[in-house]
Image: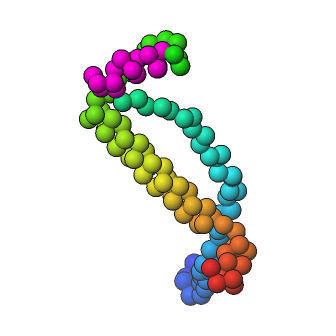
Amino acid sequence: MTGCSSLFRTEPEVVTVTNTVRTTVPIIAHPKKVNLNDVKIYVVTQDNYEEFLDEFQSKNGVTAWVALSVKDYENLSLNFAELRRYIEQQKEIIVYYEEAVKPEEDLDAKEESGN
């Protein structure tokens, strides 16, 4: 008899509570800005070769050449533009994630100030 009596027991009511928890991730400082060195590019043609060679040797002492064709120089410029685009997109992704993980207090203060 006790086996059948367990069928008529009422089950406790299950209550589901949704609680959103924000992950707090410390935001580190951005890396320092890039400090590039100056680069001087000389354009040498058959017309100015002798003059250039004399001036270059008097300033630098040694004659050494690194040559690029006009097309290769264009490709180099396009590559730098592509790198710049990529870096800018990476910065935007970093800002997005920094905003996503900001503590709630920072978000409330920003909303109150109207930004």
Q: Is residue 108 visible?
A: no
Of residue 47 and residue 64, the one placed in the foreground of this image is 47
> Bounds of the magenta span?
44-57
Residue 6 coordinates in the image, percent (x, y) = 59, 81
Residue at the (51%, 58%) spot, across then down: 93
Residue 94 coordinates in the image, percent (x, y) = 56, 57
Of residue 73 and residue 90, the one placed in the foreground of this image is 73
Of residue 69 and residue 53, the one placed in the foreground of this image is 53
Compared with 26, 3 (above or below) is below
Residue 96 coordinates in the image, percent (x, y) = 54, 63
Of residue 4 and residue 36, the one placed in the foreground of this image is 36
State the count of labels. Answer: 0
- For the N terminus, the image quarter is bottom right
Residue 58 coordinates in the image, percent (x, y) = 51, 16
Residue 53 part of the magenta-drawn span: yes
Compared with 38, 100 (above or below) is below
- For the C terminus, the image quarter is bottom right
Judged left or right of residue 21, residue 7 is left
